[in-house]
Image: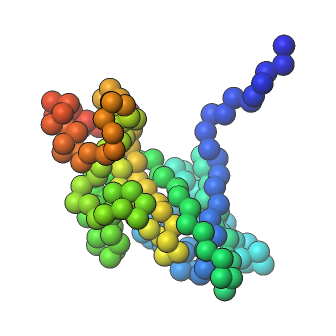
Amino acid sequence: MVERSTPVTGLYESHLTVSDLDRSIAFYRDVVGLELAHTVPPRHAAFFWVGGRDRSMLGLWSIGSAPVRLRLHIAFQTELEQVIRSVAVLRAWGIVPRNGGGGPEVGEPVVFPWMPAASVYFDDPDGHSLEYISILPDAARPDLSGRVTLSEWRTMNGGTSRSSR
């Protein structure tokens, strides 16, 4: 019998278009903390390692002065403590931590109960929606709609959610 699909074990690479490649290289290297893997000047492209060499990659491609703009989304997995810390780190860079792409400003991570996962959203210089996310060890609560703050989630779960899986 022929399999109907190929099992996927992860996402290796994703790509974004940017208006200023040098500015975006500095942002993803200095603010997001990714390791620059390779640049291809003739193609106006740069590649970053995500999670270490050979794990995942993010490609940035310059669109120059083209009037076309897309708002795309990428979530970066990290430890819960780093998601919590990211609120202050982003503010130190003058970046607004948000509750979802384009959502209101937050003072702490939000939790998607159906997963559950804690996250903080923010925008890159081109308006792409980025997210730091950590899966929580608690039981999923698909019965809860929307999002709750991490402190509300911890109260509902008896103070758990201290670390990610």
Residue closest to the eye, 31 or 67: 67
Quarter placement of the N terminus? top right
Residue placed furthest toward the right: 1
Q: Quadrant of residue 49?
A: bottom right
Q: Quadrant of the C terminus?
A: top left
Looking at the image, is 142 positioned above or below residue 105?
Answer: above
Depth check: 165 or 75 in front? 75
How far across and how far down the image is residue 127, in percent? Answer: 49, 71
Please name whichever residue, 100 or 14, is drawn nearer the observer in this view of the structure. 100
Q: Position of residue 63 (x, y in %)?
A: 68, 77
Q: Is residue 68 left or right of residue 124?
A: right
One can see residue 140 in this view: yes
What count of labels does the image hold?
Answer: 0
Position of 58 with respect to 42 (left or right) is: left
Seen in the picture, residue 81 relative to 6 is either above or below; the reply is below
Q: Identify the residue shown where x is 25% and y is 36%.
A: 161
Which of 67 and 138 lies nearest the eye of the viewer?
67
Res. 80 visible in picture: no
- Rendered image coloring scheme: rainbow
Residue 70 rendering spot, x and y as whole percentages: 60, 69
Residue at position x 26%, y 60% from top?
Answer: 106
Image position of 149 with respect to 41: above or below: above
Q: Quadrant of residue 100?
A: bottom left
Q: Residue at x 18, y 45 (%)?
A: 151
Q: In this view, which residue lies farthest toward the top? A: 1
Percent position (x, y) of residue 57?
Answer: 62, 55
**Residue at horizontal 33%, vertical 57%?**
99
